[in-house]
Amino acid sequence: MPVRIRLSRGGAKKRPFYRIIIADSRRSRDGKFIDQIGTYNPMLKKDDPGRVKINNEKAKEWLEKGAQPSDRVKIFLSSLGMVEKPIITEKTKKHLPKKKQKEESPKAETKAEDKPAEAAKEESPKAETKAEDKPAEAAKEESPKAETKAEDKPAEAAKEK
């Protein structure tokens, strides 16, 4: 019977809590288990001593019997010095940009270089004060919309007569 040291999930929705258990590898994740050797609460801070609690004696006993720890449990046991630290493989490169995106990236860089200059113009206090000094009525007289409305009124008045 292949025996594993693994996690069994408990807790509420979006509030996980795990038991570190000894179980037959053919059983379901939260199914029947042989022994419980500890707990893992990922909701606690990483430096909190209550995040991972393992009974060292039981863990050593099961490792001697031939139980194989899961990847996550192997990391926990390595921090306690019971097992060698597992080799963490490199992540896939799917997150890196593809060839076409690499070719387009110089264009994006030039746009990014232009943006700081525009942002500096917007942040200058002189530009803001000039815009605020103009009265609201003067701004309305200068706008083209105000002119079109004034022109439309005489034409409408002529149509009514």
Image: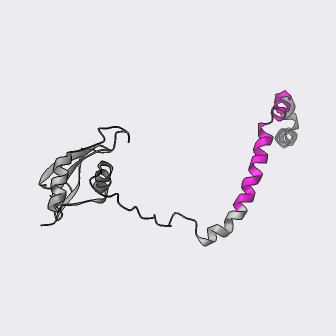
**Does residue 103 appear left or right of residue 41 in this picture?**
right
Residue 101's image quarter? bottom right
Q: Residue at x 18, y 61 (%)?
A: 67
Above/below status of 4 relative to 124: below
Seen as rendered, the residue at the extreme bottom is: 99
Q: Position of residue 158 (x, y in %)?
A: 87, 41
Q: Quadrant of the C terminus?
A: top right
Q: Residue at x 16, y 66 (%)?
A: 2
Return the residue nearer the eye: 106 or 122.
106
Return the residue nearer the eye: 116 or 63.
63
Above/below status of 14 relative to 127: below
**Does residue 141 appear left or right of residue 95 in this picture?**
right
Q: Is residue 77 magenta?
A: no
**Does residue 141 appear left or right of residue 85 in this picture?**
right
Q: Position of residue 5 (x, y in %)?
A: 21, 57
Residue 89's image quarter? bottom left
Q: Residue at x 14, y 60 (%)?
A: 65
Above/below status of 69 relative to 124: below
Q: Is residue 110 magenta?
A: yes
Q: Which scheme is used to colour this image of the protein? A: one colour
Residue bounds of the magenta highlight? 108-136
Return the residue nearer the eye: 160 or 73.
73
Q: Position of residue 76 (x, y in %)?
A: 30, 51
Q: Quadrant of the N terminus?
A: bottom left
Total marks in image: 0
Return the residue nearer the eye: 28 or 141.
28
Magenta stretch, overall SS = helix
